Image (cartoon, grey):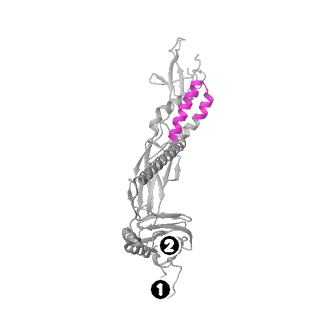
Amino acid sequence: EHNFTGVAANYSPNSLNNEYYYSYTGIEAGNYTYRWYMNDSVGNANRTGQWAFEVSADVTPPNISITSPANSSTWSSSSTVTFTYNVTDNGNIANCSLSIDGSVDQTGTSITKNTPQTFSKSLANAQYNWSVSCYDSAGYMNSSEAYYLTVSYTAPTSGETSSGGGGGGGGGGGGGSSPPREVNLDIRPEATSEEGITLSQTQYDISRFTLDKEEQVIEIKKLRDDSVTIDVAGMSSIFKVGNKREFDINKDGIRDISIELKKIEGGRAEITYRIFARPKEEQEETGKEAAEEEPEEEKVRRMGEMPAPLTRQESMFYLAALIISSSLLAAVLSHHAYHVRKIKRANDPFYQSIEMIKEINLLMAKGSIKEAKEIYSRLQLAYRKLPKDMKPIIYREYVKVQRGIRKKPRKQVR
């Protein structure tokens, strides 16, 4: 006899080697009771005492470990990359997703935990970051650490010839692509204008420009129907039509060049370049001006005598004004910092979770269960948004609130 469904009922057990057992699945979290009844073939009967037990909710998210490719490795065996991972959980896994460069690429729903699982993806030669995230059947989600991967695959030569062998020379064309060409952006004034310079380029075309007296190379590595892989000073990026990116090549915190893919048509890409760095001529002119600038003392001596020093009274006056100005500035900055912290906390899932846990505990103490459940639904969303390293800080309080919300009144047992 048990009350697993909320109503006491009798069930017939199974037996194996004179041992009796009964299996029941789908029990929700809560408190339950059961007992055993026995009778023999001649009418004798007996029963055990009533036993009670508690089923706890699964609040543990899945645990995901990456198997391959290794972090910061290079993939060169083929253009299709196989991503392998393993996931464990107390319950069942609902689904797992592969994310590439921060966006979900594909999702699998037939996941076997504790067994290596794979995703496959065809990628162009470039650098990527990737991770795997999984949801369990209780709705809890977790993500793996982000791994970095460089795809560098060279396809084998096919041995095909460009023409049909003979058939009269000189015919030209035949639909072949034009040979790669080089463009020097430095000698094009429009490259430094606000609109930039737009070029029609094909695969392997090269553009050059000078930055800090060093030549920089931009190469069209791969041209596809829907994307272009551009190598900027050794850094590869994949552009879709409409993508615009800025590059800080010398890592000085100042943008050096922007690249925008306008369109892809007829085997050519229309690309706009804009150079933000100062032209070489301007740098040289600035250096000349700095070299020719005369010292300040010479300017003063040429314009007249040095100014008279301040009196003691004037010095004290300016010092007092400086102290007052500094105090006012410090007060304004302190007030501004206070409001910035207040705004950040209001939008931070961690502080939101703490405040909601406090509010739920107060409502539960007052017996306002309905209001507490409404806040708990928002708490679940905020808790799932927390970074992995923040969740353990409030895990215990979160579980206490969860059990309090889900706890059902003890039912009367027959």
Give how far across and how far down residue 340 sits, in percent: 52, 45
Give how far across and how far down residue 149 sits, in percent: 41, 57
Which of the numbered marks, if any, corresponds to residue 192?
Answer: 2
Quadrant (top left, top right, bottom left, bottom right) of the N terminus: top right
Give how far across and how far down residue 103 sits, in percent: 52, 54
Read off the residue under disc 1: 166
Look at the image and say whether residue 259 sits in the magenta stretch.
Answer: no
Q: Nearer the viewer, mark 2 or mark 1?
A: 2
Closest to the observer: 24 or 235? 235
**Any part of residue 359 in sight:** yes
Quadrant (top left, top right, bottom left, bottom right) of the C terminus: top right
Question: Tag 1, which secondary structure?
Answer: loop
Q: Amino acid at mark 1?
A: Gly
Q: Residue at x 56, y 28 (%)?
A: 362
Q: Residue at x 54, y 26 (%)?
A: 30
Q: Are marks 2 and 1 in contact (CB under 8 Å)?
A: no
**Any part of residue 93 in sight:** no
Number of numbered labels in the structure image? 2
Q: Residues within 10 Å of mark 2 (few under 14, many from 20)?
A: some
In the image, which residues are magenta?
Answer: 347-375
Of helix, strand and loop, which mostly describes the magenta segment? helix
Look at the image and say whether residue 359 sits in the magenta stretch.
Answer: yes
Give how far across and how far down residue 137 sits, in percent: 53, 39
- Distance from disc 2 to disc 1, alpha carbons, whole Å, reads 48 Å
Question: Tag 2, which secondary structure?
Answer: helix
Which of the numbered marks, if any, corresponds to residue 214?
Answer: none
> Is residue 57 depicted above or below 281 in this figure?
above
Q: Residue at x 38, y 72 (%)?
A: 294
